[in-house]
């Protein structure tokens, strides 16, 4: 499309105030591009190799999960939450369970809370494998991605032995978890951690310290702390800009106050504060902290019940609640309104990827086209989480 | 002459030159380091499993017991409570009961599971009181027609099971043979059903 009038016509519905450039060209990036991590569409307005802006155009993966919730009983909605974020299904499980539990005033047994923490942190590691590995893959390094996939296989096996599924776990239930750990699982997890912790160093040697990789990420798509807050970034993306908000610490939900762990912050490891490399490095550091939490949880886990007594046909009185957890992609929230029946009146899911999309337009200004890949990859956007 | 030239070089230029060469050194060092990691994998044991050609153990032993595979029903022990049908969030289980008008006996005439809809969440298995509805360890089932993916477990109408109080463990056949038999129909004789019989 060389005609500037046509370009402006094409982007008018996205951004009316787009300034006309003589040499400007608009390109569709996605929705089937492999680097968009799913089906995302960006309208890239470029002048040669330099982007003037990249406008995200979402909605290709909308499945109406929130509407489905209104037609499904509370207990029956749990499998659907797996599909909100297929890389970190446990968090969506947990946040929905927590919302219903606080509405129906169900007390969750201590053992169930510990089990939830263990599986969530394992899931966080598995999710960061894909985030960091796919970022390297998008920049042209195939080996790290395959290596992380191999490590992730161990976590998948652990989850399979625990709940029977490798990705869509459907492990948590309202009032606890579906099954207790099999007897040999703690050993299995510990063996994995012993094996995995040295692998992080190896991985850093393989790719994180690689000068080519660093040059592709450092000082690219810098998000200042003020921007990060104003655009509503959450999770690792926010912490990479140096703002230490982690709901595990600040909110202290579930049994997280029992554990001793740090929240890694971005501090301009190889460039400016809040660049793509910081976002990458924060995730690598978070894996180590997750390992610490799992070790402590396995040590402290109490015996007893793993599931509270909840009626099969659960009816919740008229009320509303907002519950949130720190997912692998930042704050994940569920706003739930009940009307006295056995199904929600309205359920709204707030996810980290959706807010991360909002900054793409600002952060992409003046970037090279190839750096858009680094930006999207470092934001760790998962398409089903954007659209739900 | 040489010393005069050395003093003439601007210190900022010198540091820039040093930085330039340091960059090159770092680049090659980090690449070699990465290559060393890659190289070390030549001497480690691969963890790849050559499925399905070379397996150390049979697939049933590799897959954990809790694996949620394709559903199976041991109809001998179904009490026809229909809990699974009402629990299923996507309604992929269809059960019909018919009463013989003369003898007033109830019969299960239909127990269909549409595994093309099933999302293997396991909620139906959790509510089954006799354990007759179970997950097999089978995960591979393909068909040329989506209609064939409806597993029809009732061949001839069966009486619902009445649980005697003396029995603690019901000997449900969880080996997967039931599901495997039903899946066999896909491969051997593809059924063509143009209209939905339901």
Image: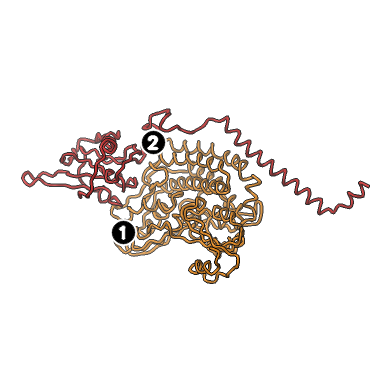
Chain identity of mark 2 = B
Residue drawn at (55%, 56%), measured in percent from left and top?
A237
Residue drawn at (54%, 64%), measured in percent from left and top?
A231
Number of numbered discs visible in the structure rendering? 2
- Asked whether, in this view, residue A194 is left or right of residue A307, the answer is right
Place residue A84 in its image quadrant.
Answer: bottom left
Q: How far apart are marks 2 and 1 (CA)?
A: 34 Å
Nearer-the-camera pick, A124 or A372: A372
Residue drawn at (52%, 49%), measured in percent from left and top?
A131
Q: Which secondary structure lies at badge 1?
A: loop
- Asked whether, in this view, residue A98 is left or right of residue B29, the answer is left
Q: Are marks 2 and 1 in contact (CB under 8 Å)?
A: no
In the displayed image of the protein, which residue is found farthest to the right? B1
Q: Is residue B61 above or below residue A218?
A: above
Mark 1 lies on residue: A71
Q: Which secondary structure lies at badge 2?
A: loop
Report the disc number at residue B64: 2
Q: Give me the chain that's red.
A: B
User: Is residue A346 at all visible to an observer of this figure?
Assistant: yes
Mark 2: give few (<14), some (14-19) or many (20+) Cα within 10 Å.
some
User: Is residue A359 at all visible to an observer of this figure?
Assistant: no
Whole-percent x, y for residue B155 in the image: 18, 39
Nearer-the-camera pick, B18 or A304: B18
The C terminus of chain A lies in quadrant: bottom left
Whole-percent x, y for residue A217 in the image: 62, 52
Q: Give me the chain that's orange.
A: A
Q: In this view, does A63 lie above or below B64?
A: below
Chain identity of mark 1 = A
- Asked whether, in this view, residue A168 is left or right of residue B76, the answer is right
């Amino acid at each position: 499309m060389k005609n500037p009038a046509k370009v402006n016509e094409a982007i008018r519905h996205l951004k009316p105030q787009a300034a006309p450039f003589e040499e400007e060209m608009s390109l569709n990036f996605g929705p089937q591009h492999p680097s968009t991590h799913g089906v995302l569409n960006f309208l890239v307005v470029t002048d040669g190799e330099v982007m003037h802006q990249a406008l995200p155009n979402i909605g290709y993966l909308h499945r109406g999960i929130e509407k489905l919730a209104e037609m499904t009983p509370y207990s029956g909605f749990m499998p659907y939450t797996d599909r909100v974020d297929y890389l970190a299904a446990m968090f969506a499980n947990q946040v929905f369970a927590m919302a219903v539990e606080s509405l129906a005033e169900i007390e969750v047994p201590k053992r169930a809370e510990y089990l939830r923490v263990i599986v969530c942190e394992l899931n966080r590691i598995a999710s960061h494998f894909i985030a960091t590995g796919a970022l390297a893959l998008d920049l042209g390094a195939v080996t790290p991605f395959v290596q992380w996939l191999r490590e992730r296989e161990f976590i998948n096996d652990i989850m399979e032995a625990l709940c029977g599924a490798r990705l869509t776990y459907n492990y948590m239930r309202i009032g606890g978890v579906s099954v207790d750990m099999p007897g040999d699982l703690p050993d299995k997890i510990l063996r994995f951690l012993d094996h995995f912790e040295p692998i992080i160093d190896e991985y850093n040697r393989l790719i994180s310290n690689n000068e080519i990789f660093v040059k592709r990420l450092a000082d690219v798509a810098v998000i200042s702390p003020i921007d990060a807050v104003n655009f509503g970034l959450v999770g690792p993306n926010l912490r990479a800009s140096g703002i230490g908000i982690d709901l595990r610490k600040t909110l202290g939900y579930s049994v997280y106050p029992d554990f001793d762990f740090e929240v890694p912050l971005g501090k301009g490891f190889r460039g400016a504060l809040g660049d793509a490399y910081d976002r990458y490095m924060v995730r690598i550091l978070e894996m180590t902290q997750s390992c610490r939490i799992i070790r402590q949880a396995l040590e402290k886990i109490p015996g007893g019940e793993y599931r509270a007594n909840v009626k099969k046909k659960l009816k919740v009185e008229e009320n509303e609640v907002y519950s949130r957890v720190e997912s692998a992609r930042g704050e994940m929230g569920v706003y739930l309104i009940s009307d006295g029946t056995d199904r929600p009146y309205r359920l709204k899911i707030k996810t980290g990827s959706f807010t991360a999309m909002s900054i793409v337009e600002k952060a992409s200004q003046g970037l090279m086209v190839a750096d858009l890949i680094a930006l999207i990859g470092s934001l760790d956007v998962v398409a089903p989480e954007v659209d739900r | 002459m040489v010393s005069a030239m050395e003093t003439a070089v601007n210190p900022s230029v010198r540091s820039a030159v040093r930085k330039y060469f340091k960059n090159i050194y770092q680049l090659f060092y980090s690449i070699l380091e990465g290559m060393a990691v890659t190289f070390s994998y030549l001497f480690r044991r691969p963890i790849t499993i050559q499925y399905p050609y070379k397996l150390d153990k049979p697939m049933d032993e590799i897959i954990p017991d809790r694996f949620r595979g394709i559903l199976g029903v041991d109809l001998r022990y179904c009490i026809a409570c229909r809990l699974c049908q009402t629990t299923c969030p996507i309604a992929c289980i269809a059960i019909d009961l018919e009463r013989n008008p003369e003898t007033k006996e109830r019969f299960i005439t239909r127990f269909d599971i549409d595994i093309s809809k099933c999302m293997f969440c396991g909620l139906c298995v959790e509510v089954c009181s006799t354990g007759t509805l179970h997950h097999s360890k089978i995960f591979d089932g393909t068909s040329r027609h989506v209609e064939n993916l409806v597993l029809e477990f009732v061949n001839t109408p069966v009486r619902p099971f009445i649980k005697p109080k003396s029995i603690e463990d019901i000997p449900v056949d969880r080996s997967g043979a039931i599901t495997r038999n039903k899946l066999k129909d896909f491969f051997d004789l593809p059924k063509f059903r143009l209209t939905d019989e339901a």
